[in-house]
Image (cartoon, rainbow, N blue to C red):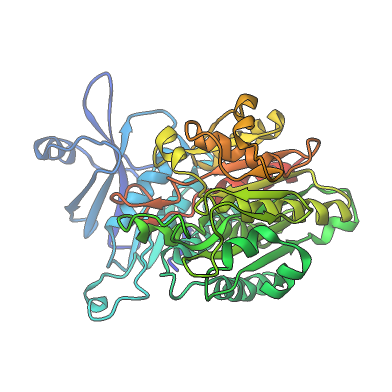
Amino acid sequence: MTTIRLTENKVVTDILVVGLARNSKSKKLEIESGDIKLDVNELLPALEDMGATGAADEIIKLPGATYKLLVLSGLGETSVNYSAETLRRSAGAAARSLAGAKSATFALPHSSKGELAAIAEGALLGAYAFDEFRGTSKSERKAVLAAVTIFAKTANSAESKAAIKRASIIATNTHIVRDLINTPPSHLTPESFCARFKKIGLAAGLKVEIFTDAQLKAQGFGGIIGVGQGSANPPRLLRLSYTPKSASAKKIKRYAFIGKGITFDTGGLALKPAQGMEAMKSDMSGAAAVIAAAIAIAELKLPIAIDAWAPLAENMVSDTATRPSDIITIYGGKTVEVLNPDAEGRLVLADALMKAAEVGAKAGGLDGIIDVATLTGAQVVALGTRTSAVMTNNEKLREEFLLAAEKSGELFWPMPLPEELRASLDSPVADIANIGDRMGGMLVAGLFLKEFVAAELPWLHLDIAGPAYNEAKAHGYTSVGGTGVSLRALVTFAESKSEL
């Protein structure tokens, strides 16, 4: 993991990272170097001659006399106060471009703790690579930027140091999520997923509970068993619980996070096409995100209680796989006609939603429940690959989450749950079918999940199908492959509820 520190003194690294923007009125380039003063008289004409634009993701490297290398990272249009996300992306793009370097100092403009934290987050998130399974080509790969120093006048303040510590926790846990998503399914099964997070969770002071396939079957988790029964790798249900030490002293908020954990999705007996199936190793992105978010919340010692649940299964083809038209019984008793075994994520989530609510009620009640899932291709059709969807039974909770997501820099968009689509889920032989109308499929999936949440329990459903796995080129602080999306929004949401 890349190290990070603050400095308010002179730059001691050979590499200096600054911002580059273009003034929308004068059309001239401007160098944004934060608290460091640079002589730009010769630099700006040279940059203009080179065709620099200052656009986001643009990186220009220049040799220098004072610094061995000057790295200019695009900020877009000039601004008195650049948004935290603009700074986060600019720092991330610079860090990505510096693979192989030992250290660099980032001098980007900022005027608040939040903007400083965004620069730190971006730099650490951008310094990521997944080379665990490289063999002969590993020696050819450049290591990620080893050390980041951020130049700031407030370097010695307690607030700045806390912001850097938080950024490090966020980045470390995001890297864990990315690593798991990028791990091939031959090495990441429901059992090994649990083993990895058990070790990390216990080290962070969380309680860990793992339900085996025998326990799941005996206790009536028909969704998880039904999806996983076709695989040689048996399903699991993982629970990590965090209760702050201050819990006994005052009333604290309590939330349940649930993440879809399909470690590989062939579609089952509704077999997916071969093209694109390799990306289905990412179908456990929601589970990794919610578990890692709970760990980050614990490491930040937030005064909020979190139960994180990961229903885990491998959706495979075999003679024991669930067949189209089979009927399964979800935890709690509701029956589901499985018309499409490839609509499996909602089945494992249904079990976990019911169990999380039951456990939460015994603990004194939940203030809300949030599920995160790479659930539908319809999400990608509707919102693309960088914006996730939010559906809910509680507008207040949705608005609170959207504010936290905006602050975190993650893109979410509210979507409706139209009652007229609910009838398409009716089954002639069971309580409900697992698929309905194809048009509006993302919304239909949300309506299915809503059936497993009590009306009085505030609930959010986050469909991250597109943003969870980047199959295009890297951008900003986002690498190719697993992204770790939703972790930052969940942690920021928990922070906002901790302050109340």
Q: Is residue 300 visible?
A: no
Q: Residue at x 30, y 76 (%)?
A: 134
Tell me the quarter of the picture where residue 145 sits.
bottom left
Q: Is residue 14 visible?
A: yes
Of residues 409 and 315, the one nearer the viewer is: 315
Q: Is residue 72 left or right of residue 244?
A: left
Of residues 238 and 54, the one nearer the viewer is: 238
Q: Residue at x 79, y 60 (%)?
A: 243
Of residues 183 and 22, the one nearer the viewer is: 183
Q: Is residue 53 left or right of residue 441?
A: left
What is the count of numbered marks?
Answer: 0
What is the x, y in percent for residue 251?
88, 48
Which quarter of the rendering shows the C terminus?
top right
**Residue closest to the far bottom:** 136
What is the x, y in percent for residue 212?
68, 74
Q: Is residue 410 above or below residue 229?
A: above
**Residue closest to the far front:** 428
Of residues 305 and 25, the one nearer the viewer is: 305
Q: Is residue 47 above or below residue 1?
A: above
Tell me the quarter of the picture where residue 183 sits.
bottom left
Which quarter of the rendering shows the N terminus?
bottom left
**Residue closest to the far top:** 25
What is the x, y in percent for residue 235?
61, 69
Q: Residue at x 76, y 70 (%)?
A: 218
Q: Is residue 280 left or right of residue 474?
A: right
**Residue closest to the far left:** 49
Q: Residue at x 62, y 62 (%)?
A: 226
